[in-house]
C-alpha cells in the first residue's frame, strides 16, 4: 500500500465520511427551512383572515352607528387588503403579505381616526 500524498487525485476514505456528515447536516437545515416557511405561510394566512374578519365586523358595526360613511368604508377597504394578504400568505408570498397586513391595519386605523 502506498502512502497518500497531497497530489494524489484519489480522495481518501476520511473525505467520504466528511461528505456524508455534511449531507446529513444539509438535509436537516433544509428540513428546518421548509418547516419555517410552512409556519410563516400559516401565520400570514391566519393573521390575514383574522384581520379581515375584524375589519368587516367593525365595518358592519360602524355602518349601523351614526358614523360618517368613510369610516365603515375604511374598515371594509382595510379588511379587503388583509384578505388579499391572506391569499398571498397562503401562496408563500409572506413578505408581501406582511406589508399588506400592515397597510390594511393602517387603513382601518386611519379610517377610525377620521370618524
Image: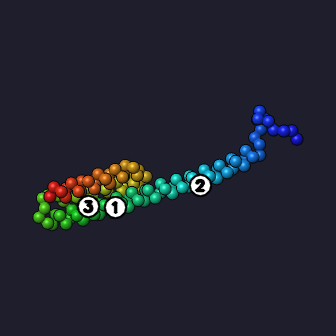
Residue 93 in picture, x, y percent from top left: 41, 50
Residue depicted at x 49% and y 56%:
36
> In the visual, does 27 lie left or right of 5?
left
Q: Quadrant of residue 12?
A: top right
Q: Which numbered disc, 2 or 1, marks the residue closer to the eye?
A: 2
Residue 28's tag is 2
Residue depicted at x 73% and y 46%:
16
- SS state under label 2: helix
> In the visual, does 9 lie left or right of 60?
right
Q: Please name the residue that numbered disc 3 is placed on.
A: 55
- SS state under label 1: helix
Dividing the image into 4 quarters, which one contains the N terminus?
top right
Q: Quadrant of residue 87?
A: bottom left
Q: CA distance from mark 1 to mark 3?
A: 10 Å
Residue 27 in picture, x, y percent from top left: 60, 52
Q: CA distance from mark 2 to mark 1?
A: 32 Å
Q: How many marks?
A: 3
Q: In the rendered view, would you say 47 is above or below 11? A: below
Q: Please name the residue that numbered disc 1 is placed on.
A: 49
- Residue at the top extreme, as displayed: 7
Residue 29 in picture, x, y percent from top left: 57, 52
Label 3 crowd bin: few (<14), some (14–19), many (20+), radius 10 Å: many
Of residues 25 and 75, the one nearer the viewer is: 25
> In the visual, does 49 lie left or right of 38?
left
> In the visual, does 92 lie left or right of 111?
right
Amino acid at each position: 500500500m502506498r502512502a497518500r500524498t497531497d497530489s494524489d487525485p484519489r480522495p481518501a476514505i476520511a473525505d467520504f465520511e466528511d461528505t456524508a456528515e455534511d449531507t446529513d447536516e444539509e438535509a436537516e437545515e433544509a428540513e428546518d427551512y421548509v418547516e419555517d416557511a410552512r409556519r410563516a405561510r400559516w401565520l400570514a394566512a391566519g393573521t390575514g383572515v383574522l384581520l379581515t374578519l375584524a375589519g368587516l365586523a367593525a365595518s358592519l358595526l360602524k355602518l349601523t352607528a351614526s358614523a360618517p360613511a368613510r369610516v365603515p368604508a375604511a374598515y371594509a377597504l382595510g379588511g379587503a387588503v388583509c384578505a388579499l394578504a391572506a391569499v398571498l400568505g397562503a401562496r408563500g408570498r409572506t413578505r408581501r403579505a406582511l406589508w399588506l397586513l400592515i397597510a390594511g391595519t393602517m387603513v382601518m386605523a386611519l379610517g377610525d381616526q377620521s370618524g
